[in-house]
Image (cartoon, helix red, strand yellow):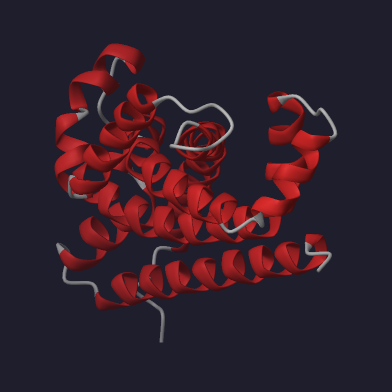
Amino acid sequence: MFDQVDWQQVWIATTETFHMVIISTIFTAILGIPLGVLLVITDRGHLWENQFIYRTVGLIVNTFRAVPFIVLVLFLFPVSKLLLGTTLGTTAATIPLVAGAAPFYARLVETAIREIDRGVIEAAQVMGASRRFIIAKVLIPEALPAIVSGLTVTCVSLISFSAMAGIVGGGGLGETAYRFGFQSFNDQMLYTCGVLLILLVQIVQGIGDWIARKIDKR
């Protein structure tokens, strides 16, 4: 039934997709969480009100969110070339992946933190807690389940983005499905890569939901 499937190529493509998604998720979290925190604490009436920073960060986040991912890949070709010396391959693909996912995740982090009861923050301020303490010991811990859930949603989006990046030389299951499946008129390769992407999404979603439930103390 699967006599036309090149399993070695499928395995290589799967590892490339894991490579792209894992690295991109890590850097998306590293960038997205601070951006999300900034969008909250610099807003009017919050811990560190600063409308210039709030509007600047908001503008950057909204700009990158507004650009379609495939266009963002093309826009960032020069950046990949400058930083890595190439625009092809899984490592080069992580740059547009992070650029597309981090602003999206920042908004999810912002939403998670805004849902915290202001009374908890005010209680910490009354006790004389510093802004750094409130961010590290109140805002992040209280919003952590939602932050993890948001990262899970973002990681699932990155799997989809990685498939699109594959079409323009990013490697992974997307490129294999396109080159060895669609362009080669090999439906078995095309469907095999599609099913693996679906399974990967299910696994990531399941793990993320489990972690969120474990750390949710409510």
The answer to which of 154 and 116 lies nearer the viewer is 116
Residue that sits furthest to the bottom in the current view: 1
Could you say where residue 156 lies in the image, as x and y percent from the top left?
47, 61
Q: Is residue 84 left or right of residue 124?
A: left
Could you say where residue 43 lies in the image, as x and y percent from the top left?
44, 36
Q: Is residue 181 left or right of residue 120?
A: left
Total marks shown come to 0
Task: Tell me where residue 149 sits by quadrant.
Answer: bottom right
Question: What residue is at 47 percent from the left and 31 percent from the top?
Answer: 42
Residue 90, placed above or below residue 217: above
Residue 117 appears in the picture as rendered: yes
The N terminus - image quarter? bottom left
Residue 9 appears in the picture as rendered: no
Question: What residue is at 38 percent from the left and 24 percent from the top?
Answer: 53
The answer to which of 150 and 109 lies nearer the viewer is 109
The answer to which of 111 and 28 lies nearer the viewer is 111
Residue that sits furthest to the front in the current view: 126
Could you say where residue 58 lies in the image, as x and y percent from the top left?
32, 36
Could you say where residue 205 lies in the image, as x and y percent from the top left?
58, 68
Q: Is residue 50 left or right of residue 137?
A: left
Question: What residue is at 68 percent from the left and 65 percent from the top?
Answer: 207
The C terminus - image quarter? bottom right
Residue 94, placed above or below residue 114: above
Question: What residue is at 18 percent from the left and 45 percent from the top?
Answer: 67
